[in-house]
Image (spheres, rainbow, N blue to C red):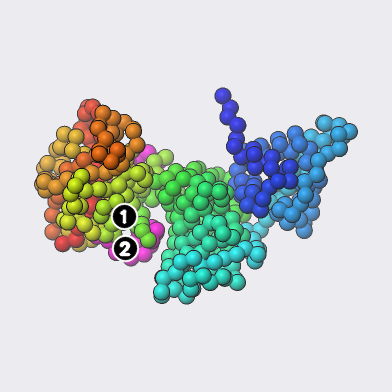
Amino acid sequence: MKHRDPRSDLIGSYVDGRASADDIRRLEGYLRTDADFRRLFLEHLNVDGALGEFASLADDTAEVPARIRPTRLLPGIAPRLAAAACVAAAGMAVWALLLRPASLSPDIGTRIEVVDSTRNSDYSLGQILAEPHVSIDQGRVTLQLDDGPTLDLSAPADVEVINGMHVHVHGGDVTVDVGDQATGFIVDTTAARVVDLGTRFAVSVGETGETDVVVLEGEIEVREPLGSDRTSAYGNLMAGDALTVAASNISRRLTAVAMEPRVTRLGRAEQPGVVTGVSDNVTDPDYRRFYGLVPGGMRNDALAYTTIGRARWRPLAGQEFPAELLGADTVRTFHDDRDRWDLEIALEIAQPCTVYVMFDARNPVADWLRRDFSDTGLQVRTGPWREVGIVEGMAPHADGGLYVTYQVWKRDVPSAGVVNLGSPRTFGQPGNRAMYGIAVQPL
């Protein structure tokens, strides 16, 4: 069954003259980046016969059609002639959008407000910026565009605001939160074009233009950079996915990302945590999950996984969070790895530390865990969970929530090096159990 594209409503509102400025920006983003959407767009024009507005776009001086009032064909025009003319005019409109120069002129009408700023930055809270080019050498700044999307810049960073739905990141780390209503936000770099299909993602650009893209919530599409003569796309990334794209058109999975408050590629900047890298033995080229590294992040209510937002570390009911774990660096794993019986994870350790593994207490203890680690006798839990297979058959807590209990195992590591971890389950083990968590406490 062919499902109706929900973006049809956006086209309909545009043709009928009901589209808002944000709708126009979203439409422009889809037309630039999605060939299927362009075909859908032309089909709608054939049906509606909206010749007037798109003929205007063929003019070299025409702007994005935010200010063009749609006009409909008179009833007497022959349908076949209308369809043919509409395709031709719309085709010119699409090419007008696609062939714009890579360096677009910024829309100086976009309101850029500083809504958060560290003391050592060059910008102050509440400041309205007059220039679309924002560069910071120290600290962190959060910008809001037209009361909509926000950009969190971590120094050093260099960003150019094209309009309220489009920016160019020339360098540094930028986290984008477009909210629920601004789908279609575009981030350009020299190596890639990122189109938002969800709510929150991060982009980090190195000195050579190499671009890291990390999806924190929702979904994005990663394509070739604007102006490229290549037509391949890198595909869609979901929450928990990360990708590195080089200027040479080579892409690879980004396996570890330093998080909160800074999102950056490991090795691009000095990392404050004990863990400097994470890798695994997964070779599937379409597998793009990343491990989230959070220095000092182990505490009550901390996220446990990169792919599930509800599962958070908690103390056992009526107890305090284990002091031994408080303030440890956390490594957020992928919960969908819970069924991999042959998984191997390697932690790159920068200094002496204690590595903790939080292992689902319902599981038989893995051989590698019993061999290399010792049971601390401590326990923590995650939750509250939705009613999914992981918690099937479990009784809810007094607060009504469903929680999974974990045993805490540890291993002392006397010097820098690599610590190897194994699978969360034994081959042939039945049941649906949670993926283990990782925390690292410096000695």
Query: Which residue is rendered at x = 55% and y = 48% of the image?
Result: 181
Tag 2 secondary structure? loop
Mark 2 or 1, nearer chain start: 2
Q: Position of residue 398 (x, y in %)?
A: 25, 39
Taking 406 as reference, is 252 left or right? right
Query: Which residue is rendered at x = 48% and y = 73% of the image?
Result: 124
Q: Position of residue 309 (x, y in %)?
A: 36, 45
Question: Mark 2 near mark 1, Cβ–Cβ under 8 Å?
Answer: yes
Which amino acid is tagged 1? Leu
Query: Which residue is rendered at x = 58% and y = 63% of the image?
Result: 161
**Span shown in magenta:** 262-285
Considering every residue shown, the one lying at the far right of the view is 76
Give the residue number, with chain letter if any, for mark 1: 293
Taking 279 as reference, is 173 left or right? right
Please give the label number shown on residue 245: none
Q: Quadrant of residue 276?
A: bottom left
- Vertical placement of 417 versus 87: above or below? below
Residue 223 on the magenta span: no
Residue 178 makes an appearance in the image = yes
Q: Toward the viewer: 182 or 294? A: 182
Residue 207 makes an appearance in the image = no
Please give the label number shown on residue 271: 2
What main secondary structure does the magenta stretch of the protein show?
A: loop
- Vertical placement of 64 versus 432: above or below? below
Location of the N terminus (image quadrant): top right
Which amino acid is tagged 2? Gln
Taking 57 as reference, is 353 left or right? left
Q: Position of residue 178 (x, y in %)?
A: 52, 53
